Image (cartoon, rainbow, N blue to C red):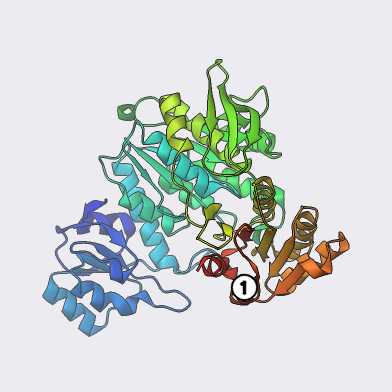
Amino acid sequence: MVRLSISDMVAATGARLLCGDASAQVHGVTTDSRAVEPGAVFVCFTGERVNGNRFAPQAIEAGAGAVVLTEDAPAEVLAAAEAAGCALLRAEEVVEATPDDTDPSATEFLLRLAALWRERNDHWIVVGVTGSVGKTTTKDMLACALATRYATHATKGNFNNLIGLPLTLLAASPSDEVVVAEMGMNHKGELSRLTHVARPTVALVTNVGTSHIGFLGSREAIACAKAEIVEGMTATAEAAGPVRPCLVLTDDNDFGTFIEERFCAPAGVEVVRTGMADTSAVRAEGLVLDGEGRPTFDLCFADGWRQAVTLDAPGRHVVSDFLIAMAIADRLGVDRAQAADAVAHMPQTRMRMEVLAAPGRPRVIDDSYNASPSSVAAALDVLCSMACEGRRVAVLGEVGELGAEARRLHGYMGAYAAAKPLDLLVFVGGENAREMAEAARTMGFSEDRLEVLPTAQRALEVMGPVLGEGDLVLAKGSRAVGLDVFAKGVLA
């Protein structure tokens, strides 16, 4: 984790030292007062519901080495800090906020601090992970593959925004060799800020979908925003070995050529393609799914090397994530067979295509962490590819951040679901759930096999008693719908 002096922090971030020893060393950074450990830095964020500045006294009492305020320090907080030997800083005020900043002063402090720590660890090989769908799965696969050779640090969960990315870098240690950094975005310019801090050498775009189209307006605008990752890419330091910048794209990315020609070529960044095409540098051949939806295929490289692989994770779509991970692992000199075997048997990520079961209850595919139109389609494909002794049931929640496209895209999702061989179809939410249901009816899905319910809790109350052993149930929707409540409740 980060280890710096107070004076280094002040110089890098423009913060003012209100009290404390400038030569004192601190280690570790958190934005949660409950996670403060002795000697750590607590950064106070002001959100819509919670003002982190109010928790400064608790952080001081917990032994924080430094507390970074975004408001003027009350006399009692200043006195408590002086008495405890805790450095008290006031973050430089940032007036202009972007749509992604919950607290621009605290955000900028974290970004600047992370940039300093990255600069001091230029031996790291940083792998940047972005895309509309599949970022976290690909990140987890990458971390698993790269750990077979390198000391690897990776983003925890989905800490991938303007707060999460700097916290990821600040949690990495000088002894780490590779940092796998997931980078999300909602608006134009956000990824640009992240990549200039992380300075990845190797990066990837999983795909260009419709996530955040409500903020960006079009898929081309989304492609441009994802391609911002190229701006900060840089070759590794000589100490880490000569790794040249490259961006990995899938061969079915319809914006791949656009990104390559408009962003990569001018920046001198090589593009590596993965997928099912014969021309792909890393590809899958002979893909089939077993009764549990698990893919088996031959992993093939352009030099003729191949190996049979079966992934524990269900679905065709995870093969794409696997190929990207293998392309980057190979780029970094990882043994192909070791990397493939490690990823093939890695644990499933919670609430992401996680297959759950309990005695006497249905099997549940819990994919409730988040959703986009394309990931809903992929999840439905998995549901219908798995063996099932009873009924196939899809419980689909609304998808957020679709803006003016929400009605049309929810209609597509409802129609896609109706075309699948489902026994029961449940839509959860408000107007957009009703839009999905109407599209399903238009496609001929039977009314007596369709439900529209307002909340995940109500879905549990209505569907829980009628689902039983042998049934296979998919729970999929945006995080705000909270379908994890349904998934857990059905198994209770």
Mark yes or no: residue 352 visible. no
Mark yes or no: residue 486 visible. yes
- Report which residue position mark 1 lands on: 465
> In which quadrant of the rendered view does residue 140 lie?
top left
Q: Position of residue 370 (x, y in %)?
A: 57, 59
Instruction: In the displayed orientation, state which residue is furthest to the top.
Output: 304
Give the residue displayed 52% in from the left and 53% down from the top. 354
Numbered-mark total: 1
Position of residue 40 in the picture relative to residue 353 (left or right): left
Q: Position of residue 135 (x, y in %)?
A: 53, 47
Position of residue 27 in the picture relative to residue 406 (left or right): left
> In which quadrant of the rendered view does residue 174 lie?
top left
Residue 119 vs residue 391, the one in the foreground? 391
Tell me if residue 301 comes above or below residue 416 in the rendering: above
Residue 75 vs residue 282, the one in the foreground? 282
Residue 403 vs residue 304, the one in the foreground? 304
Position of residue 293 in the picture relative to residue 155 (left or right): right
Other residues around mark 1 within 10 Å, as few (<14) / some (14–19) / many (≥20): few
Q: Position of residue 406 (x, y in %)?
A: 73, 64
Query: As shown in the figure, which amino acid type bears the numbered disc 1?
Result: Pro
Residue 301 vs residue 338, the one in the foreground? 338
Give the residue displayed 72% in from the left and 53% down from the top. 218
Q: Tell me the SS state at disc 1.
A: helix
Q: Position of residue 366 (x, y in %)?
A: 56, 58
Give the residue displayed 47% in from the left and 46% down from the top. 195
Tell me if residue 235 comes above or below residue 33 in the rendering: above
